[in-house]
Image (cartoon, rainbow, N blue to C red):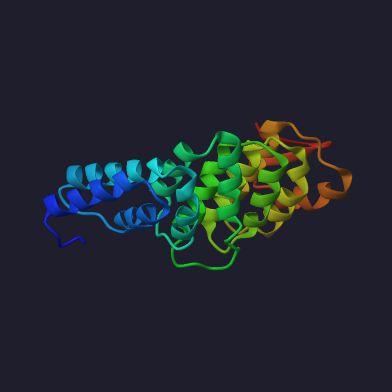
Amino acid sequence: DKMAQNFDRQEAIEQLAAMATAESAAALLKRFNWSMDPSITDQEEKETAAQGVVAAGTAALEPLRAYAASAESLTWPLKILRQIVPPEDFVDEVLGLLDEFDTEYVRNIEPKRQLLITLEEFSSPEVREAVEPFLTDMSEPIRYAAVTTTFACKDPASLGALVEAITEEESLRIRNRIALGIAAAGWPIPEELRGSLAEALPPEFTLIGDRVERRG
């Protein structure tokens, strides 16, 4: 309760944290729905709540997934998730959360953007395939994040999706990011993609043979 006395709320958080169950984890996660002043108290309460969720271990996974599905921000859920599961399972959890999103308009893009940024750390065909659809998302910041994460996978198999994205892209910022990424990677462009790519390249870039290069 945001309107409760700080002492009473802190005591409730500590008691729930000590329970270390799926039910207590679900209750503690509600603390991340709002912020308060002073910020140092807000941070301390959230840290205690997070530790309580982590203490529940894998029992907290289902409440975490359910909370993340409608959360306004995933900063704390992702931080908690990293402490509960090993790295190889963490990426699967993030991919599972991303799978709940599509490329249509949403009022709050932050959870989707946070997931895409988090996936920059992981390079795999599974990540690339999961991220590629968001290259044509309705939101420009989401498309930009998807481009960055796609290049982080360092997989030339993404060329087709990237070329398709740049030919449809209106944002010069994203077109420049795609062109720069392809040029920096030095990927040879398949013949069937060269024509459409050459037409879509920003003025600073050109196609020479089968490679994208920066002019000058």
At x 55%, y 54%, the residue is 97
Instruction: Count all numbered tags in the image, as a single digit.
Output: 0
Residue 59 point in image, percent of width and height: 47, 49
In screen coordinates, is 100 left or right of 198?
left
Q: In the rendered image, which quarter is residue 110 located in?
A: bottom left
Q: Quadrant of residue 164?
A: bottom right
The residue positioned 83% from the left and 37% from the top of the image is 210
- Spot occupied by residue 5 in the image (x, y as percentages of width and height): 11, 56
Image quadrant where one finds the C terminus: top right
Q: What is the quadrant of the N terminus in the image?
A: bottom left
Q: Position of residue 116 (x, y in %)?
A: 55, 48
Residue 158 percent coordinates (x, y): 74, 45
Question: Is any part of residue 176 visible from this angle?
Answer: no
The front one of 11 and 76 is: 11
Please indicate whether residue 32 sits to the left or right of residue 210 in the image.
left
Residue 211 visible in the shown view:
yes
Most foreground residue, 197 or 27: 27
* Residue at figure coordinates x 18%, y 49% from the top left: 11
